[in-house]
Amino acid sequence: MITKDAPQYRLVSDKLWAEANAISDQSAAATWRGADGRLKSRATKSEFLLSPFLACVCGGSMHAKQSGKGDKKRWLYTCTTHHLRGSKACPNGKGIRVDWADAAIRKIEQALKEQKARAKDPAPLKAEAEKLRKEMRPGDRCQTEGFTSASCRA
């Protein structure tokens, strides 16, 4: 095959072509695929914290969906495969409440931030560890520090 540059036939400029490819590359980098190469999620701007990351036991992605009526109306993360193709494609008809799942993630995030702050300044953590050591009974201390029962008796 012989190729020849023919700018008169271009539909878009080189600059626009490069910008479009950059956007496509960013989207591909933000896409999560399973070990089998199947798409699990794609880049999204969802208001739901976990939508891009959750996967069902069937391997399909999960999305947020409103369920219930009246006062019992709730947002749930549910299996997209079950939603689109029914229980023959995925038997998991249950969902995870969005508010509970997102709150759990936020608690984990807060705990990690606190742990990171403590790692920067270990003095309060060391003081707490020393306080706990003083409160422990002698037998408990032997177990937590890895001593054998013979050395604890001596």
Image (spheres, helix red, strand yellow):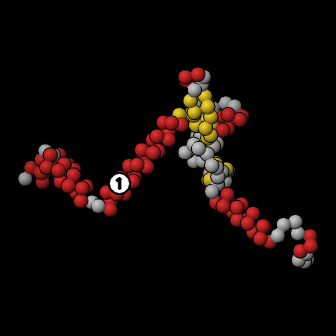
Q: Amino acid at mark 1?
A: Gln
- Residue farthest toward the left in the current orientation of the protein: 154
Can you identify the residue that label 1 sits on? 115
90 to the left or right of 8: left
Q: What is the quadrant of residue 151 in the picture?
A: bottom left
- Which residue is depicted at the point 45% across and 45% down? 106
Percent x, y for residue 68? 60, 25
Which of 92 and 106 lies nearest the eye of the viewer?
106
Percent x, y for residue 98? 54, 37
85 to the left or right of 143: right
Percent x, y for residue 93? 61, 30
Q: Is residue 38 visible?
A: yes
Percent x, y for residue 97? 53, 34
* Residue 91 versus residue 56 in the image, above or below: above
Q: Secondary structure beneath disc 1?
A: helix
Callout 1 environment at 10 Å: few (<14), some (14 to 19), or many (20+)?
Answer: some
- Which residue is depicted at the point 84% across and 66% down? 12
Which of 84 and 113 lies nearest the eye of the viewer?
113
- Which residue is depicted at the point 14% across and 46% down? 135
* Residue 54 versus residue 24 in the image, above or below: above
